[in-house]
Amino acid sequence: MEFYDIEVEKINGEKIKIESFKNKVILIVNTASKCGYTPQFEGLEKLYKKYKDKGFVILGFPCNQFANQDPKSDQEILSFCSLNYGVTFPMFKKIDVNGVSTHPLFKYLKRKKRGAFGPKIMWNFTKFLIDRDGKILKRFAPNKKPEDFEEYISKLL
């Protein structure tokens, strides 16, 4: 399976292929609403607003696999993100990023770009930067704040 062939489900239930983001610089993030890194939503939204008109998009994928830090429904997660952090970038249905039920998108991302401790996602807010051709260029650890890697995004645009 190729990157652009992978199907994902928006938080509203609409199924789309990653192909709908072709020719954009993409940042994919596994998110959580009750994590120490949750305030990164603010920085992510700033990046999105700054660069979205230049062909940049952030795709947020809630995940509840780390210390039960996103237990609410998809609609409650979306409401939390928009009310507390003004999130307007696309959010998707809650998924698993590790284990037997790992979503195909994260299987692909982990296979293409390993982290410091191997392919496994270690925590919420792991980020993958993909260029306009669908090549996974970077994997950022959860503690990397959005402003720490803005230069990579701006160079790709």
Image: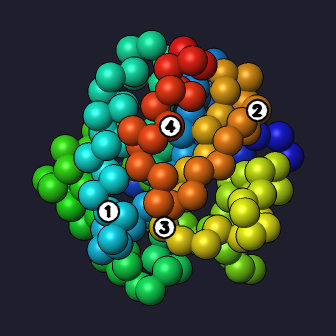
**Residue at x 30% of width, y 27% of height:** 49
Query: Callout 3: helix, strand or loop?
Result: loop
Query: Callout 4: helix, strand or loop?
Result: loop
Q: Earlier in the sequence, mark 1 or mark 2?
A: 1
CA separation, marks 1 and 3? Answer: 9 Å
| Residue count near mark 3 (Cα–Cα under 10 Å), binned few <14, some 14–19, many ≥20 | many
Q: Earlier in the sequence, mark 4 or mark 3?
A: 3
Residue for badge 3: 124
- 78 and 130: which is toward the camera: 130
Quarter of the rendering occupied by the C terminus: top right
CA separation, marks 2 and 3? Answer: 22 Å
Q: Which mark is residue 135?
A: 2
Q: Amino acid at mark 2?
A: Lys
Q: Is residue 92 left or right of residue 38?
A: right
Query: Callout 2: helix, strand or loop?
Result: loop
Q: Looking at the picture, how far across and down is residue 23, in whole percent? A: 63, 18
Q: Earlier in the sequence, mark 1 or mark 3?
A: 1
